[in-house]
Image (cartoon, rainbow, N blue to C red):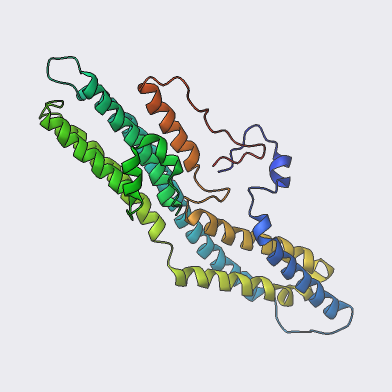
Amino acid sequence: MIITKNRTWLHLVLTWRGSVLPKIAPRVLFATALAAFVTAGHLTWDLLHTNLTALPFTLIAVALGIFLGFRNNTSYDRFWEGRKLWGRLVNVSRTLARQHLTLLAPHGQEPDAACRAHRERQVRRQIAYVHALRLHLRGETELESLRPWLEPEEVEALLHEQNRPFAIVHWLGEAHRQAWDRGWVDTMHLPILDQSLVEMLGIQGGCERIRATPIPFSYTVLIHRIVGIYCLTLPFGIVSTVGHFTPLVVALISYAFYGLDAVGDEIEDPFGYDPSDLPLSALSRTIEINLRQRLGDRELPPMLQPDATGLLQ
């Protein structure tokens, strides 16, 4: 995600990284070059005369704008829902850590060393869960970032799991039952702990739904085709009216339509590494630091900050 702070209007206009311009530049340049060729053929060589007027393109532009607006609104809804889900994950992680550290204790007694070790292990599993969910949503399979938070045998067990975050939640639930068997958690508190796990899985299911259900392919193909055909045929309809300014007009219009089309593609899946995607690494680090502080850790990693270009991942 690009984080912009104290940037001038001119800087935003001229910025390159984080915009969709690098992706659409070849298409815009091709449409502009074609417009220049049509203009030269029409005005200089007295060729490429057509009876087209700007009216059909005006009507198509209105419909195309509506389609692009609908698609971009749908893509942004997916992006914003993903952000709300990760906001809920931050909250439920803090809540579950508090529950582990306050509800897991023998009734009327101070927790002994075994109980305190159990508490810490549960909180560390929570940290592992958050990192595992980030990797799961980004389609990554490495386990190195999970090793500091899990036992070696648990890391090895994850090698054979298709859904690693779910496996970790299952282990958290099993540990709650073991704590109840040992008398470390009250019968009234066990459903409270289980409800937090239910909330975590609900968040995970929402994220997986966004990732696994893209905007219908036929709709996306239709938009791409209409935008491409419109931008490539536009100079034939406006050259007799606009004249020598045809390449400039085509460049501006194609930048607008290709840009809107590319923005919809970029934010459709908000869990990747595109400049407009959610900063899952930064959110995971925030949760990790919050939970480690509750465990009393002093050597904490720094919060992730945007780089020189404002990119935060």
Whether residue 93 sits left or right of residue 37 in the image: it is: left
Q: Quadrant of residue 107?
A: top left
Whether residue 189 sits left or right of residue 80 in the image: it is: left
Q: Position of residue 311 (x, y in %)?
A: 60, 41
Name the one closer to the observer, 29 or 254: 29
Whether residue 213 sits left or right of residue 262 in the image: it is: left
Name the one closer to the observer, 278 or 137: 137
Q: As displayed, is residue 116 above or below residue 86? A: above
Q: Which residue occupies 52% across, 29% down?
A: 303
Q: As displayed, is residue 93 above or below residue 72? A: above
Q: Quadrant of residue 51?
A: bottom right
Look at the image and tell me whether residue 211 can be seen.
yes
Q: Position of residue 200 (x, y in %)?
A: 29, 41
Tell me the quarter of the image containing the C terminus.
top right
Q: Quadrant of residue 90?
A: top left
Tell me the quarter of the image containing the N terminus.
top right
Q: Position of residue 285 (x, y in %)?
A: 46, 34
Q: Which residue occupies 51% across, 65% down?
A: 67
Q: As displayed, is residue 101 above or below residue 90? A: above
Q: Position of residue 106 (x, y in %)?
A: 14, 20
